[in-house]
Every structure is written in C-alpha cells, then in structure tokens.
Image: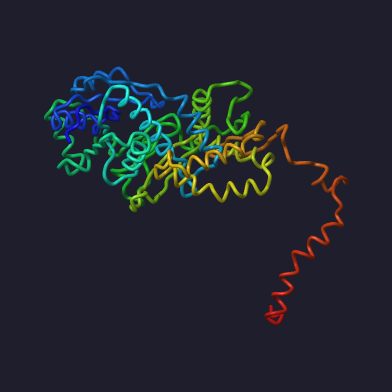
Amino acid sequence: MKPQKIVLAYSGGLDTSVILKWLIEKYKCPVIAFCADLGQEENWEEIRDKGLKCGAEKVIIKDLKEEFVKDYVFFAVKAGARYEDWYLMGTSLARPLIAKEQVKIALEEGADAVSHGATGKGNDQVRFELTYSALAPHLKIIAPWREWDFKGRKDLIEYAKKHGIPVPVTSEKPYSIDANLFHISYEGGILEDPWVEPPEDMFIMTVSPEKAPDKPEYIEIEFEKGEASAVNGEKLSPAELLKKLNKIGGKHGIGRVDMVENRFIGLKSRGVYETPGGTILHIAHRALEQITLDREVMRLKDILMPKIAELIYYGFWFSPEFQALKTMIEKTQEKVSGVVRLKLYKGNVMVVGRKSPYSLYKKELVSFDETGGYEQKDAEGFIKLQALRLKTFNLLKGGDL
C-alpha cells in the first residue's frame, strides 16, 4: 500500500539527501526530514535549508544531547558495555534514540511510514527497524538502499548532481564519518584495507599520542549512583560533562580504537573510532566499582556485559530481555558513588586514586601491618576445604606429576 506521508531520518549528507529526493519522486507524497542533534556540531540552519530545497515538507531538528548522554551513554558506562572488548558503541547507542524520536514525530505528524539511510550491508538498518517495530509496528518501513537500483555511492553522486544536490564527499576524505557527542567513527573507502594505517589528518577529536603534552594531567571525576556528575569539583549536566572530558581526553590523545568487528548480519567490518571522554568515563567508573561492588555482583556484571553489549550493538534496546537487564544493572549502581582520580598521559588513562562513602575496602582487614576483624588462622580450614577435591583427583590419577 502506497504511503501517504513519510518521516525520514535525515542527516543532510549525500545518502539521506538523495533518499529525500528519491522518496518524493517515487511515492509522490509529503516527506518530513527529521534531524537528531546528538552533539555532532553541524550547521543546522544549512541542513534545514538543504532539506527544504530537496523538497521536504518540513525539516524538524531535535536537540537530544542531554537525553542521549544521560539515558544511553551513561547506561553503557554503568554496564561497562564494550562490543568485542574494544568498541564503546557510539553509533549503536545513538540509533535507538534517533528511531524512537522519529516514531514519535511520525505519530504526531500523522505519517504512516518511516525511512532511514542505512545500507543493506550494515548494522544500522537492523537498529532502526527493530526500534520501529518495537514502538510502532503499524508504520510502514522504507529502506531505499534495499529497494533502489543504485549500485553504490558513485551512482548517488551522479543522481545528486543531476538534481542539484550538493555533494559533500570528496577525494580528500574518501571514507564515511558518523559523529555524535560520544564518538566519531570512520569506515569505508581507504579504511576497507585493514592493513592500511589511518591517515593522521583524519582524526578530529584527538591529537596523536606523539603530539600530546609531555606533562601528565590529573583530573577527578565524581559519580552519583554510577553516573558522572562533576569534573574537578565542577557540577555539570551529562552532555556538558562529556563535552568537557572529550576536550581533556582529546588533548592527551586518548580514546582511539582501530578494530575489525563482526557485524550482526555476518560481515566483518573495519572501523576506526575516537571516544576520548567515553574512554575516560569507562575506566573511572570501573575503578569506583572495584571498591563499591560486592565481588559476586561484579562478577555477575562481567558475565552479563558481553550480552548487554551485543544487544545494544545488534539493536535490541527496546527488547524485553534488554529492559530486564537494564533494571538489574541499575540495581547494582545504587552505591557506586564517590570520586576517582586519574592521570592522563599520551593516550593512557591511569587510575591513581578512588574513594567512596560506600567503599567495601577496609584497610584494617587487608593490611599486613594491622590486626583486627579477621583471624588469619581461619584461613587454614578454608584452604583445606578448597584442597579436598584436588587431593581426591590426584589420588584417582595415581599422583603423577
């Protein structure tokens, strides 16, 4: 059934600008362009003008920075979520929020269809469409990259030139960029060869560690229930705090990652990422958990972390299993409050101090120089019980070394 009105997730780049014009031509219906401001520092008025010139009925721009950091980035930090150990998932965390707001706009504007600019080879198509399906299953989903006859971006550039759409991709920057307040990602083009080192002039948020200051910088981050609330004693909103840490971390060359990851659909993809503030937050938060979380709670979190990261990466933010895990993670963070002191130096983040009113670290229990609260002789029975199964096993095999 032909859609009557479409809401497009619009960035103003080559792909979504071509998609906007293509949707209007193909479906002969109004298209609303929706832009999510997640801190990517765009010229929003230029993007608005470009969308209107491409034929959009209207261009809606929403400032979602605070919600993005507080409800999505901070949760990932609380969960310690890293996909395949390295990726802090700046793109993965942004997509469910963009799609959620897009659905909200579609319902408010009386649209019966939503569209996105994700290709048929990547993860974003899944993230967008799983969110659409979870929140508004009655909406028609249009994925142009899976429908049109264009073979690649060369075809898109020709189409854009034909229709007078400015082309932002140049030979000087032959790769794709996705940016928000949490990170910048680079993929495609020259980066598709995993043997090729990324050019230094590609990076935007960070200096190279070689060019970072020769003197280390010390900072303190305060947390309340697992969420960062202040830097060096200055209380900041979530978005402002992350922005400040990005600036500090970027100056010291912190947060660069170059990895080949496994996409949900089964392909391997090389991505290069800059996440300076996020890297600092993850390390600081983990240090605070080390003194505030019970051992078994921490281990349970560590067991669940890969699954949480996988669900985020795959696009299952609004799935029942992820919502259940979110509740569990929030419960673990009730006493994760305190201050962490960090030393930043040439790409490295070193924890040099941590304190909390809820600290489970008790010096009098662990110190070699103090007694009290623990009878060392009790360890003898504990060790004998632990050794019992080893003795039994060794006897069974004949005691051979």
Q: How many marks?
A: 0
Q: How is the image coloured?
A: rainbow
The one nearer the camera, 7 or 338, is 7
Residue 342 spot, x, y in % from top left? 62, 34
Residue 306 spot, x, y in % from top left? 50, 49
Q: Quadrant of the N terminus?
A: top left
Q: Residue furthest left?
A: 162
The one nearer the camera, 28 or 196, is 28
Q: Residue visible at 54% across and 41% down?
A: 79
Vertical side of 35 occupied by 142: above or below: below
Residue 98 spot, x, y in % from top left? 37, 31
Displayed quadrant of residue 401: bottom right
Q: Residue visible at 25% across and 35% down?
A: 140
The one nearer the camera, 211 or 149, is 149
Displayed quadrant of residue 363: top right
Left or right: 51 with respect to 396?
Answer: left
Vertical side of 243 occupied by 129: above or below: below
Q: Residue furthest bottom?
A: 398
Residue 47 spot, x, y in % from top left? 28, 22
Left or right: 341 with respect to 80?
Answer: right
Left or right: 367 with respect to 10?
Answer: right
Vertical side of 33 occupied by 148: above or below: below
Displayed quadrant of residue 340: top right
Q: Residue visible at 60% across and 21% down?
A: 234
